[in-house]
Amino acid sequence: MKSAARLPQVPGCLGPANGKDSTLKVVPGAMHARRGLSQRVSYRVEQTCNRGGRLKDQKKRQLVQKLFYLWIRKTFGRVHPSQARTHYQQRVLWKAFEVWREEWWVTRKEWRLCMRAECHYRTATKPIGWKFIMQGNNST
């Protein structure tokens, strides 16, 4: 606490938060009475963007969050809502596709069978028709 006693008292600034920290905290909106003092910042100086401090902190937080969710899943066996929603949507889509495929298959089979029956009918009735025509021509 000895170092805190040596610091000048500046209006609008608060003293150190604990005895070990000797940095001054700036109160937002307060005006300094003296012009010669440099303004102190309220965040940690070692966490700057160019040194990667904040980025490292964000990476740590993201990793902790990821591991936390993995722990929850392994511990409680819970499925996340996004996974449940994705699974449901995939199953609904698959069932709709199965119904469409069955409809397409039946329609295709029916069309093929109809074409076969029509061709067979034509080829089967042509000789009968010709036989009838030839018998009609012979009788006259």
Image (cartoon, grey):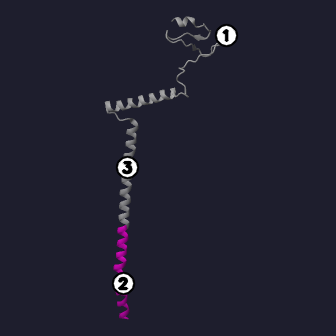
Give the answer, above or below, for where 17 lies relative to 128: above
Label drawn at residue 2? none
* Nearer-N-terminus badge (3/2): 3
Closer to the N terminus: mark 3 or mark 1? 1
For label 2, the SS is helix
Q: Which residue is mark 1?
A: 34
> In the rendered view of the protein, which quadrant contains the C terminus?
bottom left
x then y, percent, for residue 24: 57, 13
Residue at x 38% of width, y 92% of height = 137
- In the rendered image, residue 59, in percent from the top left (x then y), is placed at 46, 30
Residue pointed to by mark 2: 129
Discs 3, 1 touching: Cβ within 8 Å: no
Choose top left, top right, bottom left or bottom right for residue 82: top left
Residue at point 37%, 56% (across, down): 101
Q: Which residue is mark 3?
A: 94
At label 3, counting other C-alpha atoms closer than 10 Å, the crowd grade (few under 14, some 14-19, many 20 or more) is few
Q: Give amino acid for label 2.
A: Gly
Looking at the rendering, the stretch of residues picked out in magenta corresponds to 112-140
| 135 lies left or right of 8 | left
